[in-house]
Image (cartoon, rainbow, N blue to C red):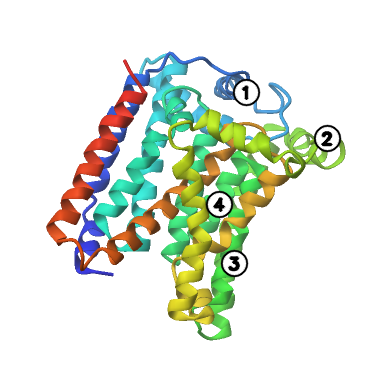
Amino acid sequence: MPNSVRWYCRWPLVEIGLFVATALVFWPAGFEGRLTTDDAFYFYSGRRLVEGVPPFVSGFDNKLPGAPIIIAAFIWLGNRLGMDALYAARIAFLGASCLVVVGIYRLCLLLTGAIRIAMVAAFLTTTFYAFGQFAGGGPTPYTLVALFVTWSLLSMVRQSFGRAALWGTVSGIVWQPTLFYGLFPAVLAWLGPAGSWRARVGAVVRVLIGFIVPLAALAAFFAYSGALDKLVEDAIVYNVKYLDRGTPMIKNPWWIVRAVILGFPEASGLIVLGLLALPAAGYARIREIGLEAFLRRDPWRVVVLSVPAPIAWSILDFQTSSDFFVFIPYAVVGVAWLLWKLGDLTRDAVPRVWWRASQACALVLLALYSASLYPL
């Protein structure tokens, strides 16, 4: 990693600026947005939890209760500060949306080592209309999914596999399909880097601890509340025995395309381009360093090897554009790789000062364009 990148990783000045800039872009959308049926239910469950009634007792839901628990924490904090409960939750989720952008910036920075490219790519996230619309709207649990999946990927790139499993499991407690990110770090931990079998077993054990601890804490909380049976019945038994997911999306792929275009109309082309770039990135890295080195130590293996999981789930069950939030870090990383390769190809043909100026101009234009998407 270049020394300049190490400096930026140590002193998070860019992250602070990016957080503030993202908040300024999303803020005009306001906090008066329509509360959808699902989001209203999660807000209601969170509010009832503050009153002492646990999720599943206050109402039926077949998802694990991560979203109501987190919403309840911010409602409780808002009550202490004299804030309206809904505004408190929406302001907190605006902060979570900004943290998604910051996390994606750090992820792109560690993968490419190019600070300006990482900034431009991460700020592309503000052009994802469905994501920005729910920044101060909602509170939608899929914002939390995007945040925790991004943190899990970031931890895997840093080879902090226990922490990656922790964030992945917390994401799964919000939305069950992302429990994958609680166990996938064990695969990477076992693959490498090469070392003694004791080191690998130790890494896998840390992953299992990161996976088990949030689930054990959740079970302990519901057992203490006397609602463990409701948790098991609604979030596990119902999904296994009674839930009918209907026709798999593989038989109606245009539904996914339609949802992406309607949810992200301005950025749908970039999203598709970024996702298609990931297999190319994996192939290029394997050609450059070899398959074994790629699987054992290359940071790009994290995004290339993990992206098939959400794709597989989407083929089976894709409902709305919010289900696409899990792909946001992948799409942006793919765009970052394309910009990175473009920089390599034009390094000798274009003066460096022009290349840097073009990146700065792209960032300014993105900011202006994103601001126009969320008018006052």
Q: What amino acid does circle 3 point to?
A: Ala
Front residue of 99/198: it is: 99
Q: Position of residue 209 (x, y in %)?
A: 58, 61
Front residue of 73/341: it is: 341
N-term mark: 3 or 1:
1
Q: Position of residue 160 (x, y in %)?
A: 45, 64
- Give me the C-alpha separation between circle 4 and circle 1: 22 Å
Q: What amino acid does circle 1 point to?
A: Asp
Q: Are marks 3 and 1 in contact (CB under 8 Å)?
A: no
Task: In the rendered view, tell whether residue 73 sits above or below residue 47.
Answer: below
**For the view shown, which residue lies furthest in the bottom direction?**
196
The residue indicated by pointer 4 is 168
Q: Secondary structure at mark 2?
A: loop
- Give me the C-alpha separation between circle 3 and circle 1: 33 Å
N-term mark: 4 or 3:
4
The residue indicated by pointer 2 is 244
The residue indicated by pointer 3 is 186
N-term mark: 2 or 3:
3
